Image (cartoon, rainbow, N blue to C red):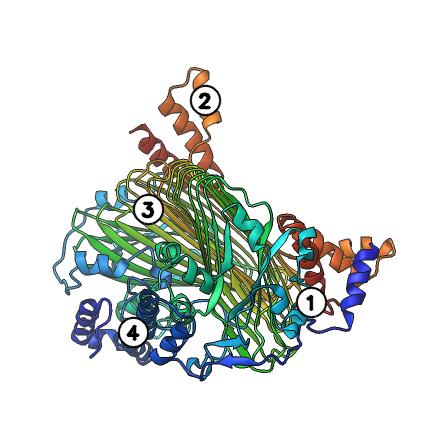
Amino acid sequence: MSDDNQILEEFTSKEYEFGWTVDLEADEAPKGLNEDIIHFISAKKEEPQWLLEWRLKAFRMWQKMEEPEWANVNYPKVDYQDLIYYSAPKQKKKPKSLDEVDPELLATFERLGISLTEQKRLTGVAVDAVIDSVSVATTFKETLSELGIIFCSFSEAVQEHPELIKKHLGTVVPQSDNYFAALNSAVFSDGSFCYIPKGVRCPMELSTYFRINAANTGQFERTLIVAEEGSYVSYLEGCTAPQRDENQLHAAVVEIKAAKDAEVKYSTVQNWYPGDKNGKGGIYNFVTKRGICEGDNSKISWTQVETGSAVTWKYPSCILKGDNSQGEFYSVAVTNNYQQADTGTKMIHIGKNTKSRIVSKGISAGYSQNSYRGQVQVMKRATNARNFSQCDSLLMGDKCGAHTFPYIDIENSSAQVEHEATTSKIGEDQIFYCQQRGIDEESAVALIVNGYAKEVLNKLPMEFAVEAQKLLALTLEGSVG
Amino acid sequence: MKKFAGQSIIDKLSERFEASKQELTSNSTIADVRQKALNHLVENGLPHAKAEEYKFTNLTKALEKNISFEMNTERVSVSKEDVEKLRIEGLDAYYLTFINGEFNSEFSDEVTESGISFSPLSAAIQENNQLAGKLFDKLSKSTEDAFVAMNSLLANEGTVLEISANSEVSKPVFVQYINTKSSDIHAKNLIEVGANAKVTVIEKVDTLGAEPGFSNIVNEISVATGANAKFYKIENDTDTSYHISNIHVSQDKDSTFTSNTVALNGAMVRNNLDIKLEAEGCEAYMNGLYLLNGKTHVDNHTIVDHMMPNAYSNELYKGIMDDKSRGVFNGKIFVRKDAQKTNAFQSNKNILLTDDATVNTKPQLEIWADDVKCSHGCTTGQLDKDALFYLMARGIKKDRAMAMLLHAFASDVIENLELEPIQAYVEAIITSRLEK
């Protein structure tokens, strides 16, 4: 119990812990979005011609698209011409090893709690850190490459493994998929690429840390994970941003491909700046994440803890194409103050004997709106498909809202699909019980919320689970009573 | 001019409205409403293929293809036997029969009981009945649904029922619509249930002959303080009939409303049920059963809107889809900011018997109050293999065993139908279907 107390005390006086900026000299593109900017980004990254054309094609598609309005969120429209689409921390030359990296950058990551140095060996996490738009450092590269695993920044992969990128890029999330995916495809600046060869079990957690630092920039990273036959990888993603008054845009794309017998586990702790108590500022988090279980017996598992962002629009999905493939989605979404979240998943059952499981826990406090939007689709040929979905919402306070929009479309008679949802508040009797035993109200709430979210938190890798618990407490601080 | 979905239908409806304008706009209040409905249709069109509310049910396209929407003045004689056959055996009720959208006093019973007054809508409009002005296009609004607008534009007939305070109507009122033409009928029922009154209303729409027909019925039901109203809807029309029903209910303090919807046949059926719990202590029950075969397409959209505290709602919809049928369910529960201490439950269960049948379901919760207990559950599957095996191991043939299990599946909804003749009617249809 003392742990929980400590957590609360630690955060009582704080608003947003990661809300500092560092004066990093940045190399920026001019404001605005047009074909010249795309040429500029592509040239900066020294990209091959086909990739430039790929980007331009996406841009032309984007121009014809309209921003989607179906989500249950309200926000002032983004002026896409008022954004900077490329911002890179300035470095004199490419660092060969960590010693050559800008010390100020390294200090930034120390403050974030990510040590880029090889100390990480102890915790066994390989980190790729992306600041603003550019990947700044990747650790453990050599250890991984011995096993044939490629884990590097996206731009590096474009240079060194163009054949892999060309083969897989945009095959799960095509450029024309949606408005934000098209935008990302046109202007993405960096991200992570991960390739696990046949039969390799990645010995450590792979991790990417994203941070938006410069003002007025949009961050558009792209992650591509390819798991070949019989491989396994667990991948973590974390995000923070400084506190700013204006809204910033984050439109990322994540693509996962799992071949026969492969398993990919993708965990996110999303803690972008959520805006202040009056709903001013904060990140717009418009993300497209999708995985495809291409081969038989493959498995993709999404785990997310969403505590940040002013507006979240995110639906990590699984296409279960291979027979016996499995998709999982575990989510805790916490909204406080004026945050809005519209998040959920899509499970598309195509192969035979496919299974999916959805566990979504929403917690809304303050004036926030929290929506679960999901789809379970069982195609005609997907015999013996099985799905279980559970979406629970917890309301704290009478100004917030919790919404559930599950779509269930079944075309096969052997499918077994179950969905259940509940909405409730923390019981007075539960709090009373805790108080009787000398636990104050705020700690009691933290305790109950942690218990409520435990099912999802348990799915997170160890280091992340601790961080996620603290984040939960931090986000809900002051929302009781 | 911009072309909308269903433009050809709207053009024909406007023509028809102009042609019978004199008759339709004799009452100035209603004339206004009709004009507004027309404007709404002309400006917005009918629901297009991607409209969220009609996503799985493209009624506009089906109507464009199958229904002429021509004005039809020919008269077809309907025999007493035809009418009787379409009623429910053994059900003692006040039968009110409308043939091709016109009230037929010959086949109808006279409602003589004190405490209940009936008049056909056309007469009510002529006489400037206060209820017609009060409810017509008020609970269900033209601006909210294009088919309501279509109804408000053309409906000149229907049932106006007024149950005075504290009266308990001794037997159910059975409203029967019979369509014999290959065209469309639009009818509106306006029902006011006075304080502490009790009434049961049953509605059934049928088509005679194999020609495709379209019926568009709107019910506006106002339930006063402490009243108890029950509404049954039985849909067992021909294979070529299209039907849309809009039932809009407003409930006052401590009132109870029960809706029972049984969909058994038709080409495409769409039911919109919208219950507003406008005061404290309301109770709403929604039961639905859809038992489909052939190419029948049934879409149930329900909304229960908790606006004030301490209300209770309970919804149970079950469906069995056979052959190439499709069942759609969308249940919305809204709990507004003021509606603390709300209890709302919803359950939707489906069984698919073939791989050509489809189910699309979307149970939706939207909650803005914190001190509530709300839950929904939804399952889709097939019959329990273990149960089937158990029965077969005891020498029961597979078909018979399946029939028993399907009966059991549907039984809790059927038990909620309190009128025995209706229970027997539904049971008989299930049995005959399963024996096939």
Secondary structure under the numbered disc 2 in the rendered image: helix
Residue A417 visible in rendering: no
Mark 4 or mark 1, whichever is nearer to me = 1
Left or right of residue B202, residue A242 in this image: right
Q: Sort mark 2 into few (<14), some (14-19) or many (20+) by Cα contacts within 10 Å.
A: some
Cα–Cα span, label 2 and label 4: 54 Å
Q: Is residue A348 left or right of residue B236?
A: right
Disc 4/disc 3 C-alpha distance (Å) = 28 Å
Q: Are discs 4 and 3 located on one and the same chain?
A: yes
Residue displayed at 58% across by 79% down:
A281
Label 1 in the same subunit as label 2: no
Look at label 4 and name its amino acid: Asn
Compared across the picture, whether B308 is left or right of B65 comes to right
Residue identifier under label 1: A110
Residue beneath disc 4: B44
Residue tagged 2: B389
Q: Give residue B330's quadrant in the image.
A: bottom left
